[in-house]
Structures are given as C-alpha cells and as structure tokens.
Image (spheres, grey):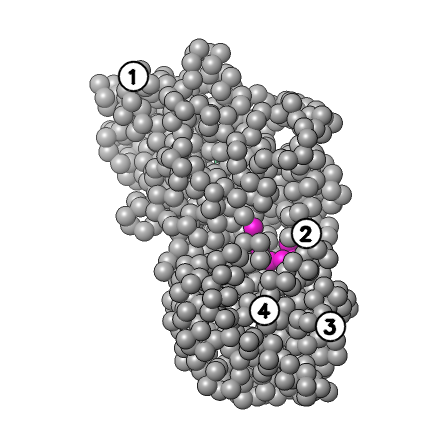
C-alpha cells in the first residue's frame, strides 16, 4: 500500500511494500471492500490503527521479540536431497514454517493481529479456521495476551481436524462448529462475519489469510512476508544466488504471499502457487480457484472464485481442509493477471504421494496443505532439471493430518497385511499402496533414474 | 422520477409510514414464493423487496438463511427474480430487488439494469455494496432511471452518512441495530437516533428502517419516526412455519395497521 504520509520513525526498518494495493485496498480490479456498511467503521479503525502500529518502533520491537522468543524465528532452511531424486534431481530447499510454535505459518500473522487488538482496546477475538491451524494460532495468542477467543470451524472440518479442535479447547478458546452450507471454511467465514457485525464494539476479527476486505489482504501480507524476507537472505547466503522458482500451496494464499513478497521484484525468480485440485479440475470437484474460477465477489473482496452462472459460490473439494476454499486472496488474482505469478492445480492423489514421499525420504511429516507445494516441486523439478534450485514453503507440519493420511493409505490395521510392493512414484497411490514397514519410494532409485 | 420516493411520498401524504415487505424468491419454490409475495401486496405492503437467493448471505440471520439456502440449491436465479418483479408490479406495489452484489455482478450490472427496468422494477437494494465500490451500478442505474438503495448503520460516521445518502435514490435503508437480520423482541433506541442523524445528513431523502420489526405494534413504534418500515424475517417465518400465502397476507394486514396507527 502506498502511504502518502511522511515516513514514520519505524518506516526505515521495514522492507519496501510492493506498489499495491492502493489506498483503498485495490490490487488492480481486485480487492476492495464488499461488506455491509455496519462494518466500515471497524475496518477503518483497523486500517488506521494498523498503519500507525506498523511503523511504531515499540510495536516493531515487541513483534520482533515475540517472533524470536515465542515462535522460534527465524525458521531454518532444509535441503531435501533424497526427496529431490523424485523431482528431476533439481535441488530443493524447504522453508521450515512447520517448525514454528503451533506448527504452521499462521502464528506469524496472528501475533501481529493480536497486538493490534490490544492496541485498539478490544478484549475479544474471533477467527475462522479450516485446518484448525489458524484457530490454534489465534487461541494461542489469545491465551498469551489475555484475550477471550471464539473460533468458527465448519462441522466437516471439526471432524477431519479433530486434534486441532482439542488443542483450541485446551488453550481456552470456544470452538463453534458451523453447520450451514458446505460446513467448511467458507461457511466458517460467513459465521465469523455475522459475529463480528453483532459484537464489533468489543471484538476484533483476526482474519487468517490474505483474503477478506481491506485492510486484511495487505495487513496479513505484511505480517507473513517475514517468511520470504528471511528465506531470500538465507538462500543468498547459503547458495550465493537466488532460487529459480519459489513454490507454495494456495488456500486463501497467506503462506504463498508470505514467501512470494520478497521475491516479487526479482524478475528471474518464478513464483508458483499450487492450488488444491481435489479429484481433478476437470471433475468439478476441486478448490483450484484461479485455475478453474472466474472473477467475482466473495467474503468482502473481488477476486477469482468458484461460482456458477447465477453467481452462487460453488462448494470446493479438497482432502486438505486448509485449502478447501472456493475463494483466494485478491493479490494472487492480481499477480496472476499481471503474469508475475503462475498457478497450477495439484490433485489429492498427487499431494498424498508427495506427502508420503517426504515422510519416507526425509523424516518430515508435512501438513497435507504443504504437500501440495511439494507435489508441485516434483513436477517443476522434472521440468527444470538438476541445475534448478527450488525454494518450497513447508507451511505446516502434519500432526493434525495423521488420521486423514492413515485412512488414505489404509494404515489402520496393517499387521496382518503382506507389506507388498512399495509406492511406485509413477503411479497414483491407492488405498493400501503404502504399508507400515515398507520404505515408500525410499529406494534410492528415483523414477527419473 | 424515483418510483420508490413517489410511493413513500404518497404514504406520507396519507399521514403514515410506508410498509416495505421482504421475501426471497424460490422458497419453497418459485411459484409459491411469487404467490406469497403477491399476498404481501394484497395485505397492504406498499413496496416489496424481492430477495435474490445467494449462497453466502453474510448479513442474514438463521431464518432468511434457511429459506434462501433451499432456493440456492434449487438453482433459482435472476430470471425467476424478474418474474417476481413483474408479479409485484401487476399486483400494484412497487418492486425493488434486494441482492448481495455478486449475483448482480455475475449477471452484469448493465444487463441487470436493462432487464430490471423492462420487468417494471424500481431499482435495487445492495446490502454488501457500498457506494465507494459501486461505480458500475451507479452508472447503469443512472442510465436506466433506476433507484439505488444503500445502507447506513449506527456505526456510520457523519461523513459516511453524507456520502452514502448522496449516492442513494429512492430511499436510504437504516439498518437499525448492529447485527444480522432476524426478529427481535424490542426495537432499540439506536434506530431512532440513526434516523435523526441520517435526516440531518439528507433532509430530502426518505429514511426506511429495517432489522428486527416483526409485528404491528413494533411497526407502529418505528412508523412514528421513520418514513418506511421494512419487515423481512417475520414474513419468511410465515413461510418456514408453513402458513404460506395466507400467513403472509395476515401479517401484512397487521403491519399495515401498525404503520397507520
Ligand atoms: C499448514 C497450512 N498451510 C497452508 C494453509 C492454507 O492457507 P494459506 O493459503 O492462507 O496459506 C493452511 C490453512 O489452514 C495451513 O494450515
């Protein structure tokens, strides 16, 4: 966002923002504020307080301290050589957001918004959550800062991410299962907005991704860009050069914007967002918003979305609760339209193949969301070959997904089952293709060999 | 000439507030909903807000959500809405479309305006579109001589009351309470304050109050300080609870007495 005010004391400490959005939150034709008038005062208050806070040295020092001492930043870079054998032998570096406190990148944004909540004098936060990671992060920050916390979560997601529901409740948050519509993230956002408009005097909405009305897309980007700011320096220091491509999964798009932003001015660096392809974009059962959607308005902003001819939002489908969303942040729509970033779809099966591969070759269990980025790296690595250097955002860890993955791979009752052949990476995994004790794709013979 | 302003002015000349009924198209199906909408007019509604079903009605409470969800799942769209517009016009009330922005954007603001005017519609109310984002709609409604109704809320600053009312034509919708649609036991005093502030910003624009009114005595209370009384969830409840067009007509009669008392 371009500010017209003179530079503030903390301004010089901040990395330069891209030249967007404009002062009213527009990224080209995307973004803006499509909300009831009742919320405009709260959005104005947030915008104003945030613009003051972001250049306030006291805030910057506190935010920096929390990131180091509480989250554990900077997160490391890990090269994954054994995995890379299945990705055209390109070199692959992971940015380890899975090692953050609470297990994903979501904490980066939440700490910033929780500090902002205190600054505007509100005592209660609400949040929506899909995979539960944003809900857990919000519940965590609320506990840390003494705020009361209510999290809206689609009933379908409370089932498939039950571990995170328990975590939120342990942290003292109220979790409200949402039973309207598709019972997933989209409907949780609707309920959170309804709560907000009713309780706006006491309550701040801690939005979990770079979507929603202005100022959320710009503010969440600013809080998440630490991922790419760190990674760019780490890669330069380690490799003496920039990566050829930066990859991240895209639900609403916060981890992707977080790692992309520092690289936007680096023309030679390809930015690749991996959307959830579900059963395949051609089946209609997917969550690949930019790949398979059209511009429209949802949840307070204009962006690509999955919609029918009547302008009704189409329910999305993905094995990953965190990517199961029919919208996407407006900055991604803009980066797509200006050609600065490219977006591709990864199916459930491809993501789960990459999930298994990272587990078995590197000893890292990724979030299923992040596994979409890994699957993208397998494809892009093969396209670019062994000279390529890829940076992949490992946005979260997979503890929450253990049950979903066990069901997918049929690992529940494996004792009597013949181990059989391991996963052949040329094939789509089928239930039972991975056994408990067979090294999946763990042979050193990559499929390119 | 604004048809909404004209009708509200006629009510005023009779020494009363206008009764504005909201019902969505498509619950329980298109034909029955149009019969119910017609019954609302027969019972005494001056204006009918014809609701466009939308999958993500962020400003609506459970009652309207439940009805609209059925219509969305049945694939009810703008063509059905335009049929309802014609029916209201034929029944003698002023039809105005109530729609979240995306269904109109998807249909095309210009095409929507052309077709709405042809069907006899007076204009549209857009609860999640603020004038700041409404360039296409402002241009299209101007071109087709349609009314456009934006919302003000208790949280609106004086500056926003001024800019929002300046963009309105027909009337301004005062959302009386902070919250979503639904019937409420009492009409708070926030409504009266908001109406007074809004009038100060725009002395010549009709101010109609919505959110929470469900019966004749509440309608009378609001009619004492507003130019129009908007009732939605109470009508929808008649449909959800199976009383159909007869229930809707009876509710209109009760409310019509209220705005005249
Ligand atoms: C680990 C992880 N990655 C990615 C996402 C998707 O969100 P976003 O696209 O905003 O990064 C989620 C959302 O829950 C998540 O938990």
Q: SS class of the residue under badge 4? A: loop
Q: CB of mark 1 within 8 Å of CB of mark 4?
A: no
Gap in angstroms between the C-alphas marked 1 and 3: 71 Å
Q: Residues within 10 Å of mark 4 (few under 14, many from 20)?
A: many
Chain label for disc 2: A
The span picked out in magenta is A33-39
Q: Is mark 2 within 8 Å of ligand 1?
A: no
Contact between labelled residues 4 and 2, with CB atoms less than 8 Å apart: no
Chain designation of label 1: A
Residue at numbered disc 2:
A41
Between tags 3 and 2, which lies in front? 2
Which is closer to the viewer, label 3 or label 4? 4
Q: Is residue A440 above or below residue B157?
A: above
Crowdedness near tag 3: few (<14), some (14–19) or many (≥20) residues, C-alpha within 10 Å:
few
Q: Earlier in the sequence, mark 1 or mark 2?
A: 2
Mark 2, Cα crowd under 10 Å, few <14 / some 14-19 / many 20+, is some
Name the quarter where the C terminus of chain A is drawn: top left
How far separated are the C-alphas under marks 1 and 4? 64 Å
Tell me the residue that label 3 is attached to.
B186
Residue B188 position within the rendered picture, expressed as x and y whole percent measured from the top left: 75, 69
Q: Nearer the viewer, residue A281 or B6?
A: B6
Estimate the spatial distance between the alpha carbons at disc 3 and disc 2, rounded to whole Å: 25 Å
**B145 or A412: which is nearer to us?**
B145
* Residue occupied by mark 4: B169
Q: Is mark 4 within 8 Å of ligand 1?
A: no
Q: Residue at label 1?
A: A386
Can you give x and y, in whole percent of width and height, for residue A114 in the image? 67, 38
Residue in front for this viewpoint, A296 or A326: A296
Q: Is residue A366 magenta?
A: no
Helix, strand or loop at mark 1: loop
Closer to the camera: disc 1 or disc 4? 4
């Amino acid at each position: 966002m371009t500010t017209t005010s003179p530079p503030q004391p903390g301004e010089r400490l901040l990395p330069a923002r891209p030249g967007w959005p404009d002062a009213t939150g527009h990224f080209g034709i995307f973004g803006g504020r499509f909300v009831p008038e009742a919320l405009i005062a709260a959005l104005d208050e947030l915008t104003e307080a945030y613009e003051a806070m972001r250049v306030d040295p006291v805030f910057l020092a506190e935010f920096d301290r929390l990131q180091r001492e509480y989250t554990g930043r900077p997160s490391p870079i890990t090269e994954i050589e054994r995995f890379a054998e299945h990705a055209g032998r390109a070199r692959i570096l992971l940015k380890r957001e899975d090692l953050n406190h609470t297990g994903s990148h979501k904490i980066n944004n939440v700490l910033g918004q929780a500090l902002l909540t205190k600054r505007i004098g509100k005592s209660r936060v609400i949040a929506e959550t899909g995979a539960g990671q944003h809900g857990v992060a919000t519940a965590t920050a609320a506990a840390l800062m003494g705020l009361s916390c209510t999290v809206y979560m689609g009933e379908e997601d409370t089932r498939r991410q039950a571990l995170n529901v328990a975590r939120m409740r342990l942290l003292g948050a109220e979790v409200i299962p949402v039973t309207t519509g598709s019972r997933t993230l989209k409907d949780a956002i609707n309920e959170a907005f309804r709560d907000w408009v009713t309780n706006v005097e006491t309550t701040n909405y801690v939005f979990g991704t770079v979507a929603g009305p202005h100022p959320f897309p710009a503010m969440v980007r600013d809080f998440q860009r630490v991922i790419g700011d760190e990674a760019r320096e780490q890669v330069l220091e380690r490799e003496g050069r920039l990566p050829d491509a930066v990859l991240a999964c895209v639900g609403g798009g916060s981890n992707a914007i977080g790692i992309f932003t520092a690289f936007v001015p680096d023309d030679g660096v390809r930015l690749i967002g991996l959307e959830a392809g579900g059963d395949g974009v051609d089946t209609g059962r997917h969550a690949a918003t930019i790949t398979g959607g059209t511009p429209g308005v949802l949840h307070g902003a204009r962006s690509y979305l999955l919609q029918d001819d009547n302008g009704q939002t189409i329910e999305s489908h993905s094995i990953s609760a965190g990517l199961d969303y029919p919208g996407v942040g407006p900055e991604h729509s803009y980066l797509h339209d200006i050609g600065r970033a490219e977006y591709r779809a990864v199916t459930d099966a491809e993501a789960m193949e990459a999930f298994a591969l990272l587990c078995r070759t590197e000893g890292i269990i990724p979030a299923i969301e992040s596994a979409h980025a890994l699957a993208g790296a397998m494809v892009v690595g093969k396209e670019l070959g062994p000279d390529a250097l890829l940076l992949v955002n490992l946005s979260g860890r997979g503890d929450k997904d253990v049950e979903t993955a066990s069901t997918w791979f049929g690992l529940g009752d494996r004792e009597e089952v013949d181990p059989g052949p391991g996963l052949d990476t040329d094939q789509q995994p089928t239930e039972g293709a991975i056994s408990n004790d067979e090294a999946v794709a763990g042979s050193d013979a990559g499929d390119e060999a | 000439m604004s048809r909404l302003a004209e009708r509200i002015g006629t009510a005023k000349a009779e020494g009363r507030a206008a009764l504005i009924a909201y019902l969505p198209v498509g619950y329980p199906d298109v034909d029955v909903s149009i019969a119910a909408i017609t019954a609302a007019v027969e019972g005494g509604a001056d204006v009918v807000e014809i609701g466009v079903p939308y999958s993500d009605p962020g400003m609506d409470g459970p009652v309207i959500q439940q009805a609209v969800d059925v219509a969305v799942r049945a694939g009810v769209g703008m063509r059905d809405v335009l049929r309802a517009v014609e029916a209201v016009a034929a029944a003698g009330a002023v039809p105005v479309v109530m729609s979240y922005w995306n269904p109109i954007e998807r249909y095309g603001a210009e095409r929507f305006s052309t077709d709405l005017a042809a069907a006899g519609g007076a204009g549209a109310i857009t609860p999640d579109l603020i004038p700041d984002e409404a360039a296409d709609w402002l241009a299209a409604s101007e071109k087709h001589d349609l009314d456009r109704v934006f919302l003000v809320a208790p949280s609106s600053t004086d500056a926003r009351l001024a800019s929002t009312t300046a963009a309105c034509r027909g009337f301004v919708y005062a959302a009386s309470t902070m919250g979503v649609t639904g019937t409420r036991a009492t009409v708070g005093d926030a409504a009266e304050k908001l109406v007074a502030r809004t009038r100060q910003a725009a002395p010549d624009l009709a101010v109609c109050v919505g959110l929470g009114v469900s019966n004749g005595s509440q309608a009378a209370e609001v009619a004492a300080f507003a130019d129009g009384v908007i009732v939605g969830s109470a009508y929808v409840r008649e449909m959800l609870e199976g009383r159909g067009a007869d229930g809707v007509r009876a509710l209109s009669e009760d409310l019509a007495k209220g705005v005249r008392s």
